[in-house]
Image (tube, helix red, strand yellow):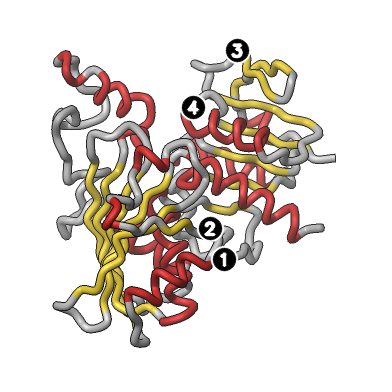
């Protein structure tokens, strides 16, 4: 018997978690849906039943659950995840709260497995998730020396308010998510700025990449940009490899590996596009080129649905991974 709680069940990611659990037919014997007091009382359909969303309280978090999927923000996770954990649950958390804690596993199932130092498992940043999978493939065959990211991140990464800023931008509606209009604009600014001029989002990608790939010596840098796209993030990666490689060989590697989908026929105008990634589970890679200005360095373009593989799907895959490891 598996008793599962979903925290943040009415949000963009929480809704996708439920859809993904249903679509992938993850076995759940008992389901409880939690939200803030503001959203409590809403009714949600799941697998032919209607569930009433309940307010999350410390008392409710002390109930016995086997697993908890959380997507309710860092402060909520900081408060409630340890309570769920102490009550015996394994918590899979989508916030940034636990990712860089030394005793917390940061997991992308195509790349690594949890060690269960604690029963809280962190879901990485959305752009990190889609990037480390192709990087892992390259690392397995050639080794990695350096990665330079530039992201093109959709407004759905900012939740409902980000989507609203884009949708209503043409009407001059007051902004809710961003300091400047995102409609007909590009913002080189995601999350808060740090003292060194990088943003917190950029630092997340740098730190998380090293942790997931288990390589603190890997050189990583990032520039994270919000673009006027509804869904699916795009990431450009400049990757320097340890062993000599070629464009053809990298294309063959990606073509043969079921962890990614290669779309790289520029002569036919075929390359990964966010509009083609939206609503799909896969990570798409293409535009593979050699950088002639740097030694053994290649450009890789990558797109993926940030609400699916970048959040809800990865969390559900972690749940499946844990269920399999504990059989």
Say whether marks 2 and 1 touch (CB < 8 Å).
yes
What residue is rendered at 62% in x and 52% in y?
318
Say whether marks 1 and 4 touch (CB < 8 Å).
no
- Is 264 located above or below residue 125 in the figure? below
CA–CA distance in space, label 4 to label 2: 22 Å
Comes first in the chain, label 4 or label 2: 4
Marker disc for residue 108: 2
Give the labeled residue for mark 4.
11
What residue is rendered at 61% in x and 37% in y?
20
Q: In this view, which residue lies farthest toward the bottom?
A: 243
Disc 3: CA contacts within 10 A as few (<14), some (14-19) or many (>=20): some
Q: Is residue 200 visible?
A: no
Comes first in the chain, label 3 or label 1: 3
Say whether marks 3 and 4 touch (CB < 8 Å).
no
Give the labeled residue for mark 3.
41
- Figure label count: 4
Element at badge 2? loop
Residue 219, percent from left and from top = 30, 74
Element at badge 1? loop
**Mark 4 or 2, which is nearer the eye?**
2
Element at badge 4? loop
Element at badge 3? loop
Disc 4: CA contacts within 10 A as few (<14), some (14-19) or many (>=20): some
Say whether marks 3 and 2 touch (CB < 8 Å).
no
Tell me the quadrant of the picture where the C terminus can be found.
bottom right
CA–CA distance in space, label 3 to label 1: 38 Å
Comes first in the chain, label 3 or label 2: 3
């Amino acid at each position: 018997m598996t008793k599962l709680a979903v925290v943040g069940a009415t949000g963009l990611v929480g809704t996708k978690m439920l859809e993904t659990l249903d679509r992938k037919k993850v076995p759940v014997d008992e389901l409880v849906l939690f939200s803030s007091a503001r959203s409590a009382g809403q009714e949600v359909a799941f697998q032919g039943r209607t569930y009433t969303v309940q307010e999350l309280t410390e008392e409710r978090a002390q109930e016995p659950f086997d697993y908890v999927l959380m997507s309710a923000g860092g402060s909520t996770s900081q408060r409630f995840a340890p309570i769920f954990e102490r009550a015996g649950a394994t918590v899979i958390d989508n916030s940034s709260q636990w990712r860089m804690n030394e005793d917390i596993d940061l997991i992308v199932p195509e790349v690594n497995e949890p060690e269960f130092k604690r029963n809280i498992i962190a879901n990485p940043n959305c752009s990190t998730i889609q990037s480390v999978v192709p990087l892992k493939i390259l690392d397995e065959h050639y080794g990695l020396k350096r990665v330079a990211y530039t992201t093109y991140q959709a407004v759905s990464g900012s939740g409902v308010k980000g989507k609203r800023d884009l949708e209503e931008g043409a009407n001059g509606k007051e902004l809710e998510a961003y300091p400047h209009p995102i409609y007909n604009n590009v913002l080189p600014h995601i999350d808060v700025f740090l003292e060194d001029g990088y943003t917190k989002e950029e630092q997340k990608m740098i730190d998380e990449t090293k942790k997931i790939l288990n390589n603190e010596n890997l050189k990583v840098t990032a520039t994270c940009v919000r673009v006027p796209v509804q869904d699916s993030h795009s990431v450009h990666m400049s990757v320097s490899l340890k062993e000599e490689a070629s464009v053809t060989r990298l294309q063959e590697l990606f073509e043969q590996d079921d962890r990614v989908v290669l779309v790289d026929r520029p002569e036919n105008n075929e390359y990964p596009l966010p509009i083609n990634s939206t609503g799909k589970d896969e990570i798409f890679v293409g535009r593979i080129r050699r950088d002639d200005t740097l030694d053994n360095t290649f450009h890789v373009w990558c797109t993926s649905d940030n609400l699916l593989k970048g959040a809800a799907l990865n969390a559900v895959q972690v749940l499946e991974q844990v269920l399999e490891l504990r059989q």
